[in-house]
Amino acid sequence: MYRTTSTFRWVRFIRLRITAILALLLVSLLAWTASRSVFANNDLKVGTIFELTEESMNNLPLALPDSLLCPLDELTDDELQSQLDQILKSNPRWASLAKAKKLSIGLVDMRDPLHARFAGINKKEMVYAASLPKIAVLLTCVQAIEDGSLQETAAVRQDMRLMIAKSNNAATTRMIDRVGIDRIAEVMQDPRYHFYDRQNKGGLWVGKAYGRGGARKGDPLKNISHAATAEQVCRYYYMLANGLLVSPERSRQMLDIMGEPELHHKFVNVLDRIAPDAQVYRKSGSWKNWHADSVLVWGTNRKYILVGLAETPEGEQLMRDLIQRVDRALMASRNA
């Protein structure tokens, strides 16, 4: 009787141990399976599950959860920076301009949108950027439409398109008059965007109408009327691509306005040839020796943001050569 009871207890103990081990293995398996569905990007929220499909990759703006997005300045990448530095060093003229703070470059590799990479040359140097800061006017106007302070009429939509696609000064001035210079400054410094940050060397600024006289309100740090930094313009496109400007729906509207550029010079002149099937969202600017261009390229293999700001008579050719060198380097690098 004693042996039977003892044997029963022993068998029961073994079964309990086996059950516990199997339960532990099951929990571990479930945790491992869940972890395979979690895309880690810096400090993500534990348990966030997201699947990035090919369809979602092809359509902008991207629909990524906020928990999977990091501020652009936290995405600085040593490898990408090294590539950009080598491109700069390969051209003595570019290196000289950069040393004199007359050439600024910003680059964001978004081929893996969950692990975007950022690099720059003089990326925080605020300079005169001619018509490129018209993107600040665009954001302000779309924000005003969303807030209800600007009526979205056919004339307003047409002027926004003319302002960006053709860089039309008269249309831009009409849009500035509709919202006011002070409102543009408010939106650029809005905590939601921080496109002009007094504590971080400025950024995007429009303090004067285009193509005419009138009141002028230079930026607080350098008193520039139409200013930009490579970093803040990169942030603008990065947030736009992720649907973070105003709202996903309004970001899509802004992408439509910025898509299919009608001025085929600088960056676009080269992209027409090397990436004819890619979607291109763009705003450029030129005045005297100041040349600026900015682009979001979205294609099957090409997904990147490039910003160039230069003060040189050769700015047009510089921009063409720059995007060709950058595109070639990206296509030859990892994940191409």
Image: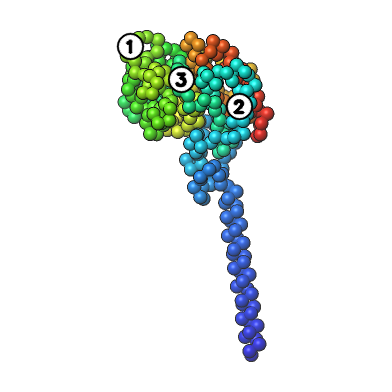
Q: Residue at x 53, y 47 (%)?
A: 49
Q: Earlier in the sequence, mark 1 or mark 3?
A: 3
Q: Residue at x 59, y 35 (%)?
A: 78
The disc label shown at residue 127, or none? 3
Estimate the x, y position of residue 162 in percent, counting from the top left: 45, 15
Mark whose residue sits in front, 2 or 1: 2
Question: Quick one: label 1, few (<14), some, or many (20+) residues within 10 Å?
Answer: few
The disc label shown at residue 309, or none? none
Task: Give amino acid for label 1.
Answer: Gly
Which residue in the structure is indicated by mark 2?
85
Q: Residue at x 63, y 89 (%)?
A: 2
Measured Cα–Cα span from mark 3 to mark 2? 21 Å
How many numbered marks does the figure carry?
Answer: 3
Q: Is residue 140 or residue 148 the one in the foreground?
A: 140
**Helix, strand or loop at mark 1:** loop
Q: Earlier in the sequence, mark 3 or mark 2?
A: 2
Q: Is residue 202 or residue 193 the one in the foreground?
A: 202
Question: Quick one: label 2, few (<14), some, or many (20+) residues within 10 Å?
Answer: some
Q: Residue furthest bottom?
A: 1
Q: Quadrant of residue 247?
A: top left
Estimate the x, y position of residue 242 in percent, counting from the top left: 49, 33
Measured Cα–Cα span from mark 1 to mark 3? 21 Å
Question: Quick one: label 3, few (<14), some, or many (20+) residues within 10 Å?
Answer: many
Measured Cα–Cα span from mark 2 to mark 1? 41 Å
Estimate the x, y position of residue 18 in percent, counting from the top left: 63, 70
**Helix, strand or loop at mark 2:** helix
Estimate the x, y position of residue 30 in percent, counting from the top left: 58, 56
Which residue in the structure is indicated by mark 1?
214
Task: Give amino acid for label 2.
Answer: Asp
Mark whose residue sits in front, 1 or 3: 3
In this view of the protein, can residue 256 be seen by the observer?
Answer: no
